[in-house]
Image: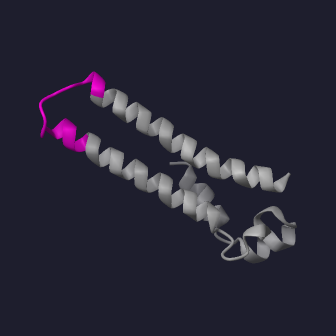
């Protein structure tokens, strides 16, 4: 069960990033303006931030336990010993 939950967290991070990107692309398509406007710059910056957020959280959750990846679905003691950064990632995931 732990492995399935671990894999679903990783996939959920990518899915949430894809949903955010789809909204941004929809807004860009809906509010078409001339290129090189402030809106165009803001949309491109938002796309970059969302991609960086998704990739960094994906790899952050993937390697939250360092080289002991199996500790993420192991016992509670293993998770406490090896996965100390997981709480910080949970807080970053809220954004």
x and y percentages locating residue 15 in the rendered image: 56, 41
Using the image, determine if residue 49 lies above or below residue 35: below
Q: Is residue 64 above or below residue 9?
A: below
Residue 63: x, y in percent? 63, 68
Queried whether the magenta region covers residue 54, the answer comes back as no
Tell me what residue is drawn at x 12 percent, y 30 percent. 34
Side (left or right) of 95 relative to 68: left
x and y, in percent, of residue 5 in the image: 76, 50
- Residue found 67% across the figure and 50% down from its top: 9
| Colouring mode (rainbow / by chain / secondary structure / one colour) | one colour
* Residue at 46% over, 54% down: 53
The quarter holding residue 29 reads top left
Numbered marks: total: 0
Per the rendered image, the range of residues in magenta is: 29-42
Q: Is residue 4 left or right of residue 26?
A: right
Left or right: where 95 falls relative to 41: right
> What residue do we see at 78% from left, 69% from top?
71
The quarter of the displayed image where residue 73 is located: bottom right
40 relative to 52, above or below: above
Expressed as whole percent of the image width and height from the top left, the position of residue 18 reads 49, 40
């Amino acid at each position: 069960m732990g492995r399935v939950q671990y894999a679903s967290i990783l996939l959920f991070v990518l899915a949430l990033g894809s949903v955010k990107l789809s909204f941004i692309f929809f807004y860009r398509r809906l509010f078409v303006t001339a290129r090189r406007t402030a809106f165009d710059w803001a949309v491109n910056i938002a796309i970059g931030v969302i991609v960086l957020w998704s990739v960094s959280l994906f790899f952050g959750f993937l390697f939250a336990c360092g080289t002991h990846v199996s500790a993420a679905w192991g016992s509670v003691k293993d998770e406490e010993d090896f996965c100390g950064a997981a709480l910080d990632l949970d807080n970053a995931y809220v954004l």
